[in-house]
Amino acid sequence: MTPAEKKLWSKLRNGQICGAHFRRQHPVGPFIIDFFCAKAKLAIEVDGQVHQSQTDYDLERSRWLVENKGYKIIRFSNDQIELNIEVVIEEIKAALCLHPPP
C-alpha cells in the first residue's frame, strides 16, 4: 500500500467509521477495489500518479462497477488523504449514510 492508502486504512479498519466493515484490495469481477464495504456497496479508490495515465481504464472500471454491480464509487487523491484526512473521512461518512450497512 502507498503511504496514503496506509493512512486511510488506519481510519477504515475495525469498523471505525459508522461501524462499516471495509476490505482492502478486494477483487470484484475483473477489477481490484482499493477499499470496499460490501454491505454498503461502497468502493473507495485512492488515486496516485499512476492514475493520471490510465484515466480510460479507471472510467471503464467505474462504469462496470456502477452498471453491473450497483456500487457507489468515491475517489480521493493521495494528496487529499495526506493533507486533509478529516475531510476525506467526512465524505466517506456521508457516502455511508446514503448506503448504510444493515
Image (tube, rainbow, N blue to C red):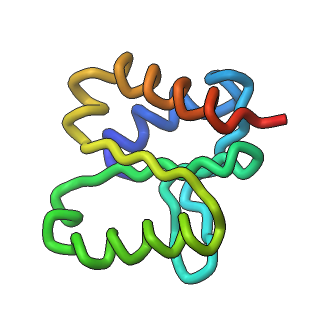
In the picture, measured across the screen, residue 11 lies left or right of residue 6, that is right
Q: How many numbered discs sit on the rendered protein?
A: 0
Work out which residue is located at the far bottom of the displayed protein and give it. Answer: 30
The percent coordinates of residue 55 (x first, y second) are 22, 70
Asked whether 94 or 85 is in front, the reply is 94
Above/below status of 77 relative to 53: above
| Residue visible at 65% across and 68% down in the picture | 69
| Residue visible at 67% across and 51% down in the picture | 41
Above/below status of 28 relative to 3: below
In the picture, measured across the screen, residue 20 lies left or right of residue 96, that is right
In the picture, measured across the screen, residue 76 lies left or right of residue 70, that is left
Which quadrant is home to the C terminus? top right
| Residue 91 falls in image quadrant | top left
Asked whether 45 or 64 is in front, the reply is 64
| Residue visible at 48% across and 48% down in the picture | 44
In the picture, measured across the screen, residue 43 lies left or right of residue 62, that is right
The percent coordinates of residue 53 (x first, y second) are 14, 72
The percent coordinates of residue 77 (x first, y second) are 25, 44
Above/below status of 39 relative to 93: below
Asked whether 10 or 26 is in front, the reply is 26
The percent coordinates of residue 32 (x first, y second) are 52, 69
Work out which residue is located at the far right of the displayed protein and give it. Answer: 102
| Residue visible at 70% across and 30% down in the picture | 14
